[in-house]
Image: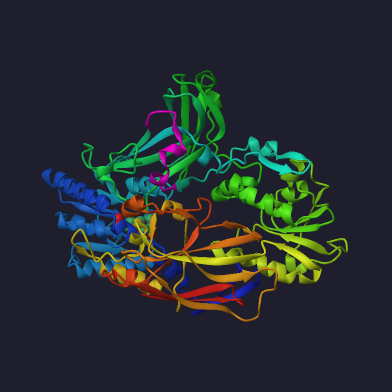
Amino acid sequence: MKTFCGRANPTTGAMEWLEEDENYDYHQEIARSRYADMLHDKDRNEKYYQGIRAAVSRVKERGEKAIVLDIGTGTGLLSMMAASAGADFCYAVEVFKPMADAAVKIVEKNGFCDKIKVINKHSTEVTVGPDGDMQCRANILVTELFDTELIGEGALPTYEHAHKYLVQEGCEAVPHRATVYVQLVESKRMWAWNKLFPVHVEAEDGEKIIVSPSEMENCPGVPSVCDIQLNQMPSSDFTVLSDVITMFSVDFSKPVRSASTYYRVQLEPVKSGKAQIVLSWWDIDMDPSGMINCTMAPYWVKPTSSFQWRDHWMQCVYFLPNEEPVLQGEKLYLTASRDEYSLWYKLQKAREEENKADVRVESPVCRCQAHLLWNRPRFGQLNDKNRTHQYVKSLMKVLKADSVCLCVSDGSLLPVLAHYLGAKQVQYLLMLLLQFFKANHLEDKIKIIEARPELLTSSHLEDKKISVLVGEPFFTTSLLPWHNLYFWYARTAMTSHLTSDVTILPQSASLHMMIVEFQDLWRIRSPCGTCEGFDVQTMDDMINNSLNFRESKEAEPHPLWEYPCKSLSDPQKVLTFDFRKTVPQHCLSTEGSVNLFRKGKSHGAVLWMEYHLAADISVSTGLVQISNDKVILQSNSLCQRNPHCKQAVYFFSSLTESETLSDLPNVVTYAINFNTKTGEIAMDFKL
Ligand code: SAH
């Protein structure tokens, strides 16, 4: 069956109806899933296995039959571990149909058909009784339902229900307990993901400062957690203000309550500073004694010897509603509030705390709109002084006193910059922040036009022609770097409103590419084969099948500052997009080859855009700098990537198809095609 899905094309802006196979979503979910990453997580797998063996033994020692309930079985891995450890029977529950089907095959292949029953249901739909899904309640509860924030995937309501209806009182649980840890820090780099700092502009008539509206200053932001690979954050980018503090624990062997609640701890800062951020992670004890522990603690807390890279569990960054100056040794209270699925934090001085009524359990709501319009990397980008400086320099070059300037970008400060840098008339198209203009008294200086580029009329422009068209470009709908080429399509749609000698800023963009060896990210797409002795190849085949579901494989967005890689080739410019001209009718294609100058595993290609703002001024959304130092080259010549943007990663099929990566190709040939009709970039690489 085919279905039609309507969507706005992120690159061309056109509303289109795509004929999608009904399985498209399934395939996307499987292809981009974290199952492979979990199966590669040796530390996790080993500890689950140890914990399961111990739980089965405890039950057997009591002279009972070991009946296991495995909620969210995925590949069936944890049930197979339980069966191997001597469990008498396992109920393996999985809600996602393609995974439940895969689990059936995997269980059969590994010879556990008579010990494991796969139930394709959500656990809350599972029935118990002679005619039910389960003959009786289980006495061992095994799950792996945790995300980086621990509870974001619904572990609490699932446990609550399981204890009420599916397991016996006094059951063994693997994991037995989870504990959430926090540490208070000051970090300009991370705080810049949450608040807009004043922007200083050197204009001809003196320095101008763009300020945030007071609503933004005092806004508690959005409750969604920011999960990152904290291990990629250098210690110079934050100052620790407190010891590591245990925030709360959940015992999974006892009834669990999912209703909203809060936890409060007292702490004394180890250093004076500005409390801005709560860093958080968790660990799980697989057994009651706590001897089998799997932790997400970052590098400065945990000795590196036990370090396990993983992407399915990272660390959390929570922004306090406001920054709070704190003194070393002073008494503070930190409150973690939670609902069923998420957590948020509040810091109070001891005297405020005495007013207990003030404990807020409601989740924060963004009042300033900015946190809804700008995501965290976007905040970081707007706070990047260096980047702003490039735009200021370029605007100064192109703006004249009589310029009629139109800006096309989402939530951009460019119109404000353009105004301060002398443009008489500035107009602004697309998503915006009205409060922002008000706070800077610019409501009557900058005109906001609420129209899509193709619907722009001369009356919107008061019969004037645009002499300077600017864009960062940035659009909230962009996922892959080239989606921001929407600027080019908007420019094309507005051609009749532009003067014949219009200046376009950026004047062009180029797509760049580099072949890399990833330190770790390759794991998320590489086959597993066997996991703890169980054959899970069915899963590999399924992922591969989904990756190849469309004729051409797709590139995927990843913020590469979190995923170190080594360059195996020089960066290469592969396509150029000239914004001074309209989008051509024909496709833009290129073919060529890149030489690999270093030994290594060619895991894939990294692609990013560079925008050429004006002559000699460019901004990169990808590579910022490669370290050429010879010593660094040998150990970790890691490439520095723009910390505010996601780059595109195209994993080579040799990585996803077999374990034998060709170690030493000297050249990689490529064919890249930008289809100007669909706005899509198709690519093919040969090693
Ligand atoms: N147990 C596997 C897979 C863990 S991923 C392993 O450890 O490798 C979590 C799985 O749980 C996902 O496949 C998800 O679809 C499933 N899931 C989450 N909540 C569930 C619920 N309440 N009932 C059934 N399946 C659930």
Q: 614 above or below 198?
A: below
Q: Is residue 301 left or right of residue 403?
A: left
Within the image, what quadrant is residue 91 found in? bottom left
Verify whether residue 241 appears in magenta. Answer: yes
Q: Is residue 203 left or right of residue 569?
A: right
Q: Is residue 213 left or right of residue 374?
A: right
Verify whether residue 474 appears in magenta. Answer: no
Does residue 138 appear in this view? no
Q: Nearer the viewer, residue 609 or 156?
A: 609
Q: Residue at x 34, y 64 (%)?
A: 598
Q: Nearer the viewer, residue 307 or 320?
A: 307
Does residue 152 appear in this view? yes
Q: How many marks?
A: 0
Ligand 1 found in image quarter: bottom left
Q: Is residue 435 left or right of residue 637?
A: right
Q: 530 above or below 262?
A: below
Q: Quadrant location of the C terminus? A: bottom left
**In the orientation shown, which residue stands out farthest toward the front?**
630
Q: 503 above or below 438?
A: below
x and y percent of residue 484 in the render?
61, 63
- Give the magenta part as a residue range: 228-246
Q: Residue at x 50, y 50 (%)?
A: 643
Q: Residue at x 69, y 36 (%)?
A: 214
x and y percent of residue 204 in the render?
77, 44
Q: Nearer the viewer, residue 379 or 551?
A: 379
What sort of colour scheme is used for the picture? Answer: rainbow
Within the image, what quadrant is residue 40 found in? bottom left
Q: Residue at x 69, y 39 (%)?
A: 211
x and y percent of residue 169 in the render?
26, 42
Within the image, what quadrant is residue 509 found in? bottom right
